[in-house]
Amino acid sequence: MPRTPTHPPRWPGLLALPLLALGTAASAQVLGDPHLTVIPRTPEEAARIAAVVIPGASPSPFEANPGGAATVRARTNADAFSQPSGNMSFDRRADFAIGNGLFRKIWVSAPSSTLASDGLGPFYNARGCQNCHIKDGRGHPPAGPGESAVSLFLRISIPATPADTEPGMEGIVGYLATLPDPVYGTQLQDFATAGLAAEMQLQVTYEEFEVALSDGETATLRRPTYAATDLGYGPLHPDAMLSPRVAPQMIGLGLLEAIPAADILAHADPDDGDGDGISGRPNIVWSPEFNQPMLGRFGWKAGAPTVLHQSAGAFSGDIGISTPLFPAPWGECTEAQTDCRAAPHGDDAAQDGFEVDQQGLDLVTFYSRNLGVPARRDADDTQVLHGRSLFLETGCASCHTPAFVTHRLADQPEQSFQLIWPFTDLLLHDMGEGLADHRPEGRASGSEWRTAPLWGIGLTEQVGGVSNFLHDGRARSILEAILWHGGEAEAARDRVVTMPATDRAALIRYLESL
């Protein structure tokens, strides 16, 4: 029987983590939330939370506001993902606006008269954050051969031995050590500043095939093949592992960051102890921000533990901009790329010697934390309510956990103690060979992916102009995304394939209302 949110947590508390997720060498560690200023819950609050996060047969009135008090009105234009948290005070909106300006900034190569905007590259995938996260939503893969990739790039790494494991991670069970490509680093950039050759050009081809559905319906899926061509610095390492990435939507990140680690871990079942076929497990990653292992939450394989880490990593890898967390002024350039490392950079004494100083990084992080989740649409519609029942019965909620309550926080009022409905457990799940990239990341294997949040999914096309889902944007509709599910999600997918067409339409309508 598929696991649903009515099952009790498997991990009753944080202290279970060292035995179940960490190796012997790390068993004394307790994985917590060092990134948050937490006010502990009272026993009475814990009891209330336990009762409210389990969806009932009838919807809760709170489901209409997926971001809790931070929910924003659902706009009908492309700005639906670009609003500040609904509970943000007026005096904090200035920081949100400044962070928005930095997020939208178009960076230029150094040296430049605009010192606050130079430092691009020397290798880069985009000139600004919003160039990838289009209108704070998803990026666009190329539609076919010859079309440029908009916010799609390739991760790259090579296998390593346990001796190459990040210091401090040696005892993490399942940690899969990888190394950067000795020439190309960890990310392939398809643009370069003047005088340098780009690292590669990305070519994508699609093979279309039909999937038969019940009641005579069919769906057409497209299977992508990726190739790095026009390599500017010689061939890839013979053991190079490539993985495509399209930029995800930005809404609700601060709320996901504020979920207690213990509550996320309570949904994990790494050995499938209950035999339901669902084996979600956490990704444990090294945090240079806090110099310790932490629970991964962000990125397609949960490779980043905090919004600040994710933001600084994107500045470095995607744009080639230095920050206090990733201070190299050449971004992703390796020691083998001597011309890249010798190119002019934009490190500025007025910004503490970085291209983006700590204040600027904090402002972008604040903005990213506070992009509001739109309210549900048509939540009381009869077809939508039927789709909600099917979502629970089909087993979708086994991974797409509907609800959490965030920590009570001393310094983040927008995220503090909110009942939220993100529809994710933030855990890793084996999604089968069809979606496998065969590239590990931390504890994530080549077939594992973090459960993607579903809030706002129905507004994807409205915000970005197209509907593209999954880690590489191959799915052009919610139904296509479901049909790509395999591995742990295969049974739920098959139920969608065989259910009456009217039920399938109701399920999709429900997802579109999120």
Image (cartoon, rainbow, N blue to C red):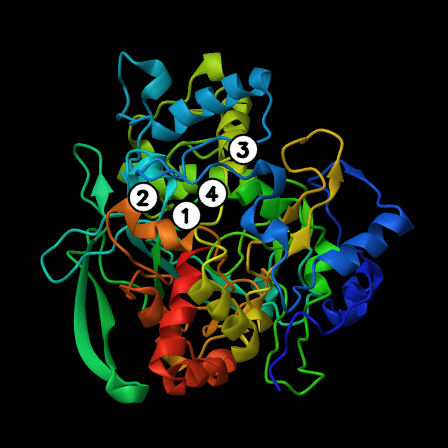
Residue 101 appears at what percent x and percent y?
A: 39, 23
Residue tagged by mark 4?
374
Q: Decide: marks 3, 4 in contact (CB < 8 A)? A: no
Q: Decide: marks 2, 1 in contact (CB < 8 A)? A: yes
Figure label count: 4
Q: State how far apart marks 1 and 3 are (Cα).
A: 15 Å
Is the residue marked by circle 3 packed among few (<14), some (14-19), or many (20+) residues within 10 Å? many
Q: Is disc 4 placed on a helix, strand or loop?
A: loop
Q: Residue at x 71, y 54 (%)?
A: 261
Quarter holding residue 28: bottom right
327 and 368: which one is in front?
368
Q: Nearer the viewer, mark 2 or mark 4?
A: 4
Q: State how far apart marks 2 and 3 are (Cα).
A: 17 Å
Residue tagged by mark 3?
85
Is the residue marked by circle 4 packed among few (<14), some (14-19), or many (20+) residues within 10 Å? many
Residue tagged by mark 1?
249
* Residue kind at label 4, given as amino acid type: Pro
Q: Nearer the viewer, mark 1 or mark 3?
A: 3
